[in-house]
Structure formats: C-alpha cells, structure tokens
Amino acid sequence: MGAGRAVKVGAVAISMVIIVGCGGSAPGAATSPSASPAVTTATPTPAPIKVRAAYGNVTPANLAPFYAKEKGVFLQNGLDVDLSLIDGGGKSMAALLGNSVDIAQLGGTETMSAYVGGGDVEAVALFVPVSPWVLMAPASYTGPNDLKGKTIGVASKGGSSEVAAIQQIERLGLKTTDVTILATGSVANLTAAMLAKQVYAGPGHPPDTAALFKAGYKVIMDLAAQNVPAVENCTIVTKKYANEHKDVMQKYVDSLIQSIVAMKKDKPGTIPVMQKLLNVTDQDALSQTYDYYVTQIFPVYPTVAPKEWLYSRDELAKSNAAVKDLDVTKVIDNTFVKNAQDRKVGG
C-alpha cells in the first residue's frame, strides 16, 4: 500500500471513531432503538377533594377527626378537609341540615331528634359507645336530697349530656321533676356555669372534670364505671350527601380509623394534638384524658349498631317523646365502617 493511500485510510478510520465517539453512527450503520431518548409522561396527581366538616363541642370525643386534620391523614387519603368548630350539637346539626357543612361530628341523640323532626340524616360512625359522663356536685353535697329544688346544668336540650343527667338523677332515686334542668349551650358553657356556681350540679368528663375536681366538686354518680351504653359522638351526614359521595365518605371514615390506630400507638404524639383541640395545658389532665378516651373508649372500628341506639333512644324518649317508636336502623349506616374493616384498614 502506498504512503498516500495509507494516510487517507487512516484519516477515514479516525473520522469514524470521532463520529461514533460523539454519539453519531458510522456511515451505513443502523441506529439502535435504545439510542433514542425515552419519552415519559408524568401522571398528574389529582387535587384533593374539598370537604366541609364541623365538630359540635370541644371534647375529647372529637379527637379522631381533629387528629386526622392535624396529622395530614385526610390529605393522605385525598381529602382537603376544612374542619371547624360550631359550638353546640344543635348548632352543628342546623349547619348540616342547612348545607353549610357536608359532615358533622356530634351526638347520636341530636341525630335521632333531628330525624324525627324531618331531617334526612344518618350516622356512619360511633366513637363513644359507652357513656363517659359522671355527675359532679359541690363538696358540700351529702346525698340525693341535696339535689331537690336545685338546677342541674346540661350542654344542650336533647343532647347526650341531658340524657346522661336524666339517667343519673333517676339512678339516684329522684325524679326529673325534683330538679330544674338548664341547657347551657355547650360542654364548655356547662363547665363554666358549674365553676361559676350558676348551676348546682351537672354531668362532666375528662378533661373538664380535672378543673371541677380542683374547684372542690366531686363525683356523685358515675355512668362510665357502670359501662352504660351511649351514642356519645358520631360522624353524621345527610343521606343525600352519603349517596352522592360514597367515595368521599369512605375516604373520610378510613382516615378516622387510621387516626384511631395511630393515636393508640403514640401517646406522646397524640397529647399535643389533644392539647390544641381542648386548649388545655395541664399535662396531668391531658394524660388522664388520653388514658380514658383513647385507651379505654375509642374502638378501632367505630361501628354503628342497633344495640347502643336502642338504649339511647329509650333514654332520649324521656325528654323527647317523638323518638319513642323510632326505628333506629333508619338513622344508622354501617357500610363504610364495614368496608374499612373488610379491607383491614385498622390492621
């Protein structure tokens, strides 16, 4: 081979190396499919669904939805929940019936009263299936006769505190006509009225009982110790909303169950959430409240079943005759809790 030709061949070879090395193809070479850059299309994350929810009293019974909001459990399930306080079960029910909120956390007694009054409502979860109420009276109380002629405070007319008060009065051997029952508007108002001596006695539960004990009040009747059935706090919706938003309701109930499980496993992480909900700084009171509600009362699966509702209906009928013959199955819907239980959402 001549020197000139060798130089030309060498130059061509070098050119091919340069082309290939720079990512090009040698002349006549097939392009590999893998050489083409991959095209990926990101799936957009759907925006969380907005839900308007309310809780009817500043009480530990409302801890599950408050925890779900504070800890981002609702968001993890695709819900953007606007959770607000509408102080008083009656006011919360009015907001629900007036379509100001989509979901309300309040008592089953208010729910039954609203239903017989024409409200198309139902309970889909029950967090406090036993009565948490103890009847508190001043230290000077010596016996049931001391209640005669006195005013007994309750949170709201037809609410769970009134049902509890009537049960307690009767279990002390008295009649409701022996006392005057005064609705104060909310649990917070009830506690304040007792501390201000505006009412002689009234039902309470942690953490309010801590302040009442410090003020010299004592327990004169304990329904909690007697494990009396109750429908103390529930998730309430209109049947129309539940039927039209089944996916939203399932996500909401799933979030509440996941929150209960998380709370039961993490007392230190739950106490600050409870402190914010209750606006209580007394750590002993908060610890007692956690041990009572989260450990003893809250079920992992907040099932709504006829047993507690029948008992509560019969007690409520003493102050609201309209519920006497109510078919309680008309106001409960356990399908969402059962769905969550079948999927083992709570473990």
Image (spheres, helix red, strand yellow):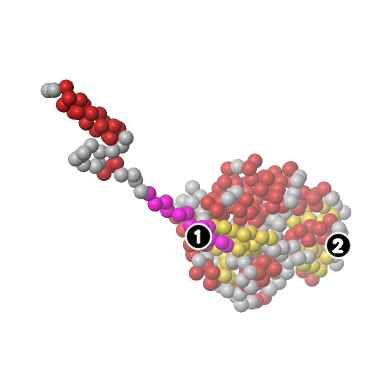
Residue 77, position as x, y percentages in the image: 51, 54
Q: At x 62% / y 67%, what residue is drawn?
A: 101
Hey, which quadrant is residue 137 in on the image? Answer: bottom right
Q: Is residue 45 magenta?
A: yes
Residue 228, position as x, y percentages in the image: 65, 58
Labels 2 & 1 near each other (Cβ < 8 A): no
Task: Tell me: residue 20, above or below residue 99.
Answer: above
Q: Is residue 169 left or right of residue 148?
A: left
Q: The disc labelled 1 sits on which kind of residue?
A: Gln
Q: Is residue 165 visible?
A: no
Task: Tell me: residue 66, above or below residue 121.
Answer: above
Quarter of the image containing the N terminus? top left
Q: At x 68% / y 45%, what residue is drawn?
A: 272
Residue 84 got which mark?
none
Residue 198 got which mark?
2
Instruction: Residue under label 1, please give it.
Output: 250
Hey, which quadrant is residue 59 in on the image? Answer: bottom right
Q: Secondary structure at mark 1?
A: helix
Q: At x 30% / y 44%, what residue is drawn?
A: 36
Hey, which quadrant is residue 198 in on the image? Answer: bottom right
Q: Is residue 86 magenta?
A: no
Q: At x 68% / y 49%, what residue is drawn?
A: 274
Q: Nearer the viewer, residue 276 or 179?
A: 276
Q: Nearer the viewer, residue 66 or 121?
A: 66
Q: The disc labelled 2 sits on which kind of residue?
A: Gln
Residue 151, position as x, y percentages in the image: 83, 65
Instruction: Tell me the magenta residue range.
Output: 40-51
Q: Is residue 12 visible?
A: yes
Task: Measure how far apart labels 2 and 1 are at the Cα level.
Answer: 44 Å
